[in-house]
Amino acid sequence: MSNTEKDSQSSEPVQDDDEPDEWDKRIFSTGCADENAGLNNCFFEKKDWRACKDEMEAFKQCWKRRGNEQRTESKET
């Protein structure tokens, strides 16, 4: 039996909860969750960030519009 077959026959049930995890909460708090989802979906489908320029731009514009720049500012130490 291969490792893939062993993995697929795991006795542990997969939990499918709809509760937001810490990542979801952080993304929702930015106000750009829809744009983030669009960007992630594009990458999942195309497997190339360069093919997702429109989605990336929409996310960047949302990020700026919502005043999230301080979340990603570089700080000198």
Image (cartoon, helix red, strand yellow):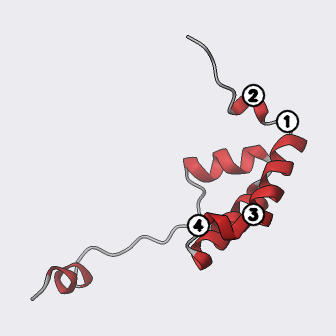
Are the residues flagged by discs 3 and 2 in contact, CB closer than 8 Å?
Answer: no
Are the residues flagged by discs 4 and 3 in contact, CB closer than 8 Å?
Answer: no
What percent of the width, then of the height, locates residue 7?
22, 78
**Quadrant of image for the N terminus:** bottom left
User: Could you give the CA–CA distance between mark 3 and mark 2, rounded to whole angstroms?
Assistant: 23 Å
Q: Which amino acid does label 3 sit on?
A: Lys
The secondary element bearing badge 3 is classed as: helix
What percent of the width, then of the height, locates residue 52?
70, 67
Q: Which amino acid does label 4 sit on?
A: Asp
* Relative horizontal placement of residue 21, taking residue 66 as reference (left or right): left
User: Could you give the CA–CA distance between mark 2 and mark 1, rounded to whole angstroms?
Assistant: 7 Å
Residue 62 vs 69, above or below: the answer is: below
Q: Which mark is residue 53?
A: 3
User: Could you give the CA–CA distance between mark 4 and mark 3, rounded to whole angstroms?
Assistant: 30 Å
* Relative horizontal placement of residue 39, taking residue 3 as reference (left or right): right
- Crowding around mark 3 (Cα neighbors within 10 Å: few <14, some 14 to 19, many 20+) is few
Looking at the image, tell me whether mark 3 or mark 1 is earlier in sequence order: 3
Which quadrant would residue 30 be assigned to in this image? top right
Q: Which residue is drawn at 81% across and 45% down?
A: 63
Q: Which mark is residue 70?
A: 2
| Residue tagged 1 | 67
- Crowding around mark 1 (Cα neighbors within 10 Å: few <14, some 14 to 19, many 20+) is few
